[in-house]
Structure formats: structure tokens, C-alpha cells
Image (cartoon, rainbow, N blue to C red):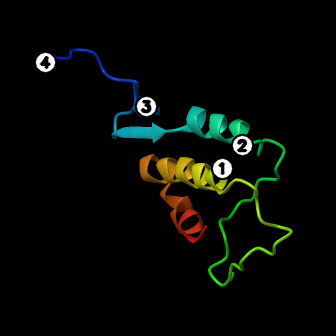
Amino acid sequence: MTETVTANWALEIYLIHTKTGVMLLQKAYVKRVVIKYSFNESRPLATSIDNNVQLQNATEAEKIDDPTMYQSIIGSLMYAVIGTRPDLAYTVTML
């Protein structure tokens, strides 16, 4: 197979070709994930999780009814980490 056109989209990743290389962006994907899981009203932070934070098990009152929702959120974030957001890798791995 031969392709003569420069790709702009591949696997939910937007490719921007520059003189020095290719930039990869997943802005549309991350925006859909944020809206899908109702995080669009959350406050953004400039930094990831602090290295010294110790996560604790949830109390019975804090536990979610459907753990597959949590797993789906983490899986969606893992895809972004693998594709274009290695800066989130530590936080997502901790979660």
C-alpha cells in the first residue's frame, strides 16, 4: 500500500507537522473523556499528584456502586498517557 498524503489524524491523535518534526496532540480525545465522566466542572491544577501523597482506601460511605466506572476512567487516562501525556503517567499509575 502506498500513501502520498501526509496524515493529520491517527488513532485519536492529531499530528502537526513542523520543520523540526511532528507534534502529537490528543486534545479532542481528552476533552471527550472529561465531558463523558462529568469532570468538565472540576478545577484544573498546574501540577500532577505530589510524590509524597499516600492514597488511602475508601470508607464504606465513599465507595462507589460500580467499580467498572472507575476502571473505565483510569483506562481512558492510560490511553492518553501512552499516546501524548507522559506527564500524567505517575498520577494515573498511582490511581
Q: Amino acid at mark 2?
A: Tyr
Mark 1 secondary-structure assignment: helix
Q: Which of label 2 and label 4 is nearer to you?
A: 2
Q: What residue is rendered at 71% in x and 60% in y?
A: 46
> Which residue lies at the image location 77% right of the left edge and 42% below the top edge?
38
Circle 4 residue:
1
Foreground mark, 3 or 1, reads: 1
Few, some or many residues within 10 Å of mark 2 (<14, 14–19, 20+): few
Please name whichever residue, 45 or 21, is drawn nearer the observer in this view of the structure: 45
Circle nearer the N terminus (4, 1): 4
Q: Is residue 89 left or right of residue 50?
A: left
Does residue 15 lie above or below 72 as drawn?
above
Indicate the amino acid at tag 1: Met
- Pick whichever of labels 4 and 3 is earlier in the sequence: 4
Label 2 sits on residue: 37
Please give the residue where the numbered disc 3 appears in the rendered image. Answer: 16
Q: Nearer the viewer, mark 1 or mark 2?
A: 1
Secondary-structure class at tag 4: loop
Dot placed on the residue nearer the N-terminal end, 1 or 2: 2
Query: Is 66 placed above or below 55 here?
Result: above
Query: In x, y percent, where is residue 58?
Result: 76, 73
Q: Are marks 1 and 2 in contact (CB under 8 Å)?
A: yes
